[in-house]
Image: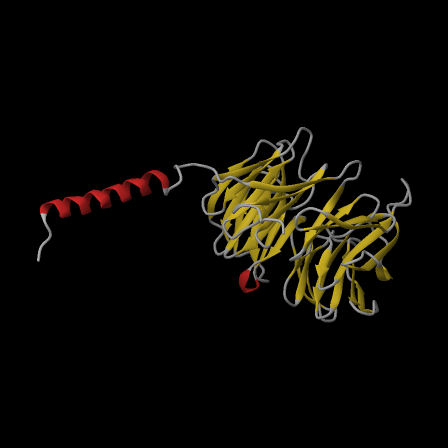
Amino acid sequence: MHGTPFSRITILFVICTVLLCQSLFGQKKAGAEIDVAKCWSYPLGDLAGDQIAADDSRVFLGLNGARIEALSRDGKKIWSSEFGGEISSNIIATDGSLFFATSEVAGETSKSSGSKLRWVSKDTGITNWTMTLPDTDRHYLGLFNGAVIVVSKNGALDAIDVRSGKVEWTRQIAEGFVGEPSFTASSVMLATTGKQILDVSLKNGEINSVRKFPFAVTALSAAENYVLILGDERGNVSASNGGDKPIWTFKTGGEISKVSAFDGHVLVASHDNFVYFLSSRNGGRIWKKRLSGRIGQISRVTERFALISSFEEREAVLTDIANGRVAGRIVFGENESLVARPIAANGLIFVLTNTAAYSYSLNGCPQNK
């Protein structure tokens, strides 16, 4: 039995109304930016710092005077401890432990005196053990098979057992390192002051390979299939698989300050004030984005978005990785700027500036219990 003309008209009217409502209310306006919600702020007062780390439940700030402050995920202080000197490494949070290095600043005539690796309780801030490190003002930490791997700026590497604090192996393999190392599952890639790239085993500290380059390497990142992405002082970005010639080379207009390889792509910051997004397969440019000044921080904070900031702008721009378009903004106060790479954990974005720590969300802030 067929419906009456009136019933068919009614059904068509309902369908059209639903479609119209979806068109009006179910889609974002073209070009509309995402509302980046600020969940909390934590003022630093007279303190400042340049290190931030997070796990599933806490945020850790590395501040001046080798002070570590532990915050809950809703921005409340849990504990605060001072360790003497200044924090000279990244902070690693794992299980119930924090690992970081400190260096005693001796004065204008000496860069540092008395560098130490510290294992601190994540719950209380109490030190479990310390281990003397090579004397330098900068260290980089990674983890491998129950050991903390310490890369020291003066060319030394150490592997230290996380439980006992005993040295498993130590190597002096270069006169010095430049830039941040890139840790892989079994090795660490290092740029030396002698314009070499070293591939060093994390198991025993032995050098797997040495690659010589005509220009000083200023940034590097391990990509897929054992390919290494390199940025140099002349503005070149290249991909190397250990051969005599690079797989590809891309030219920018200034020294490369940061490269980050992920998911078949490379995010590049150059001193020409551009951020570039390249294919790691062939070096093809997918997009480029100009900022008003020198790039300060680039950080992928979700699968889709990266945060980008310059030293001149008082904001961090949420950028759609697919096309380089502005998707949202985090605006800071007067004379406030990012001092550390933003990090993401459990759906939240944590940011450290010269005046405060912040938590942001792209999907609404969690409700405090």
Percent x, y of residue 171:
80, 65
Q: Quadrant of residue 206?
A: bottom right
Q: Is residue 150 above or below residue 69?
A: below
> Which colour style is shown?
secondary structure
> In which quadrant of the rendered view does residue 115 lie?
bottom right
Q: Nearer the viewer, residue 251 or 96?
A: 96
Residue at 42 percent across and 36 percent down: it is 31
* Res 352 → quadrant: top right
| Residue that sits furthest to the top in the current view | 334
Residue 272 versus residue 216: which sits nearer the camera? 272
Q: How many marks?
A: 0
Give x and y (percent) for residue 101. Answer: 80, 55
Indicate the position of residue 279 as horizontal and vertical percent values: 48, 52
Q: Position of residue 262 (x, y in %)?
A: 54, 55
Up/down of 299 relative to 202, above or below: above
**Nearest the eye: 357 or 1:** 1
Left or right of residue 171: residue 277: left
Quadrant in the picture for the N terminus: bottom left
Can you see residue 179?
no
* Residue pictured at 49% horizontal, 47% vertical: 321
Image height check: is 353 above or below 125? above
Q: Residue at x 28, y 40 (%)?
A: 20
One can see residue 292 in this view: yes
Answer with left or right where residue 319 lies relative to residue 28. right
Taking the spot 78% from the left edge, 67% from the top edge, the residue there is 162
- Report the side of 279 relative to 188 (left or right): left
